[in-house]
């Protein structure tokens, strides 16, 4: 769900300007297409949270065609986090929305944005790719080159689920099932986005703990980092999606 890449031609929307755009009529929102507006409206509670928490976050809408980029990702430039929308000529952007049950779209977009915000927090802490605090003394079972990015993606997923637990507790089982399905689909065990170990540990939302968004999942994050990487057919403690 994330990518750290150098931004070329971008349109950076300041918080106030973005709020004005989203509050405007469709005719006055020509700067953003309908798909971009939908993603931003869904992610808005997370963006507002970042603003309230005084995180240095910019929203970036790439104006050029970006068919090969993930629709939503994170970059870190000059000490600031960039929530990047790459949706022009990108069929993944609308296809992602279409694949989500309509009643769950907003909560799912919030989960995805919270995942990206977790990456932002790790960058700001100067901890990107570093072992989690409390991991010292443990034996990492995944020694592959993807171990560090895999840990970061696992943390992002847990923060996304912690957001859901806090903001949409009644939808948690549905959002957890959605995320597990996403992570199992075309899964490559041990790859950077193979976060099944973490997602499965969070089947019960109570395991995430309580408290501040970025701290609540940390104990579960360490447990997942110590879990062995299992093939797909061994990973499904909960029923596997088709």
Image (cartoon, grey):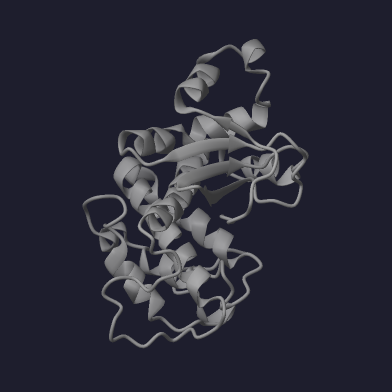
Q: Give the total of numbered labels.
A: 0
Q: Residue at x 37, y 41 (%)?
A: 55
| Picture quarter with the C terminus | bottom right
User: Relative to 64, is 235 on the left or the right?
Assistant: left
90, above or below 37, in the image = below
- In the orientation shown, which residue stands out farthest toward the left? 211
11, above or below 194, in the image = above
75, above or below 23, in the image = below
Q: Is residue 158 visible?
A: yes
Q: Which is nearer the eye, 196 or 17?
A: 17
Q: Residue at x 52, y 69 (%)?
A: 149
Q: Which is nearer the eye, 77 or 24?
A: 77
User: Relative to 185, is 227 on the left or the right?
Assistant: left
Q: Residue at x 63, y 51 (%)?
A: 6
User: Relative to 34, is 147 on the left or the right?
Assistant: left
Where is residue 167 shown, x and y percent of the image?
A: 33, 41
Where is residue 10 shown, x and y percent of the image?
A: 65, 37
Q: Residue at x 44, y 86 (%)?
A: 141
Q: Which is nearer the eye, 184 or 84?
A: 84
148, above or below 231, in the image = above
Where is residue 198 shown, x and y percent of the image?
A: 42, 68
Where is residue 224 shown, x and y percent of the image?
A: 38, 74
């Amino acid at each position: 769900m994330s990518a750290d890449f150098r931004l070329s031609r971008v349109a950076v929307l300041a918080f106030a300007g973005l709020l004005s755009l989203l509050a405007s009529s469709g005719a006055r929102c020509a700067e953003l297409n309908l798909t971009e507006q939908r993603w931003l409206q869904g992610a808005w509670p997370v963006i507002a949270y970042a603003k309230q928490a005084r995180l240095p976050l910019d929203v970036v809408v790439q104006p050029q065609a970006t068919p090969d980029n993930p629709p939503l990702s994170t970059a870190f430039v000059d000490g600031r986090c960039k929530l990047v929308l790459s949706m022009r000529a990108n069929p993944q952007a609308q296809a992602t929305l279409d694949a989500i049950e309509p009643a769950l779209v907003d909560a799912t977009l919030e989960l995805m944005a919270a995942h990206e915000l977790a990456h932002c927090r790790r960058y700001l802490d100067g901890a990107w790719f570093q072992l989690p605090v409390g991991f010292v003394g443990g034996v990492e079972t995944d020694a592959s080159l993807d171990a560090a990015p895999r840990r970061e993606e696992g943390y992002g997923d847990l923060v996304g689920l912690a957001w859901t637990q806090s903001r949409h507790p009644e939808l948690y089982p549905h959002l957890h099932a959605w995320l597990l399905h996403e992570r199992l689909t075309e899964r490559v065990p041990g790859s950077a986005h193979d976060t099944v170990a973490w997602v499965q540990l969070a089947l019960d939302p109570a395991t995430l703990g309580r408290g501040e968004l970025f701290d609540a999942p940390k104990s579960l994050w360490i447990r997942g980092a110590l879990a062995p990487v299992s093939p797909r057919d061994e990973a499904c403690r909960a029923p596997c999606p088709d």
